[in-house]
Amino acid sequence: MKITTSSIIFLLTACSSASALATDTPRRVLVTGAAGQTGQHIFRKLLAKPGYAPIGTVRSEESRQALLAGTAGIGATDKDATPIPAESVVICDITNADTSAIDELMNDCDALMICTSAKPAPTGEVNEETKRPIFGFPNGQPELVDWIGQKKLIDAATKAKKDVHVVLCGSMGGTNPDNSLNNLGKITKSDGSVTGGDILKWKRKSEVYLINESGCPYTIVHPGGLLNEPGNERELCLGVDDKISGTSNNSVPREDVANVMISALEDESYRGRSFDLVSKPVGDGVRTKDYGKLLKSLDGKNSDYSLGEIA
């Protein structure tokens, strides 16, 4: 059975109307990239959390079936895994020129969690000079996914004409234009010109647009290197501009990123904030439980977008 955006909205509206007699209307949260690893952590946690009615978006029917079957991303083996209702997953490719599906979904949502990003993969070729594998972006270059696609999502949130809180998962490294991540997917043409790549610069462009142009309340999280390890076991550390005091570690479990992003939905003090996130190694420090106290460790600081380069 093909699930359309209209049927998703109808079912969610019906369910929320019935439950509203006994409880408050659940918050409808659109989670993009729900079949991915970080996005799926968020989606599954919100499904299991009272008071939320998340909608997960995926790019294709194949991704949808894998998510429902528990074979996509973190899969159903995650300790927080909850059976995923088929009506809660919708196909919505943010790279499509037609934005009607995105607009329709956002009209019925209270928050937007952006977890989509261009994903690099080996092309099978090897750089003759470095002898290292060459990476490309088979499902869309960063300009298309991290800028144009994310802009469509942000615009849809703006057009919804209500207080849609946009929580965006970015990446550390944006203050350094020469970061090696920016070299992934670059293509040198026959005339010597270079196109593609620059993922951190395109991410930064999307973030600046969200902050300065959308008018939406926002939270932007820049995680360090993402780990496929259990969350809720480490002390988390925040900073800005690729500088974090208290640890030399530059990585963080995806599940902990999900916890911080969900906390942003529940704590008003996270609105209007942009920051970096890493964790200490397991056993080093005190496990983070209070996410409000964690945010206060920034002393009001936010990321400075005059640093680095924007595409």
Image: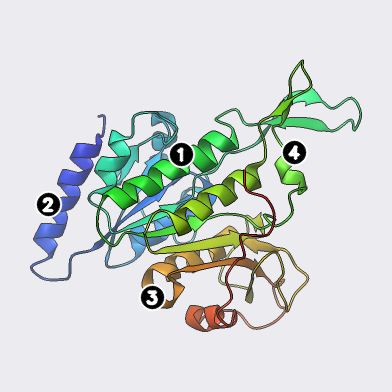
Which disc, if any, is residue 268?
3
Q: Tell me the residue at 55%/79% (across/down).
A: 300
Q: Tell me the residue at 67%/50% (across/down).
A: 309
Q: Earlier in the sequence, mark 1 or mark 2?
A: 2
- Within 10 Å of disc 3 (Cα), the crowding (few <14, some 14-19, many 20+) is few
- Amino acid at pointer 3: Glu
**Alpha carbon distance from label 4 to label 2:** 48 Å
Query: Considering depth in this image, is 263 or 178 the residue closer to the camera?
Result: 178
Give residue 117's quadrant in the image.
top right
Q: Earlier in the sequence, mark 4 or mark 1?
A: 1
Question: Is 202 positioned to the left or the right of 284 in the image?
Answer: left
**Alpha carbon distance from label 4 to label 1:** 20 Å
- Within 10 Å of disc 2 (Cα), the crowding (few <14, some 14-19, many 20+) is few
Disc 4 marks which residue? 183
Disc 2, SS: helix
- Amino acid at pointer 4: Asn
The quadrant in which the N terminus is found is: top left
**Alpha carbon distance from label 1 to label 3:** 27 Å
Percent x, y for residue 196? 66, 31
Q: Earlier in the sequence, mark 4 or mark 2?
A: 2
Percent x, y for residue 116? 49, 45
Disc 3, SS: helix
Disc 2 marks which residue? 14
Q: Earlier in the sequence, mark 3 or mark 2?
A: 2
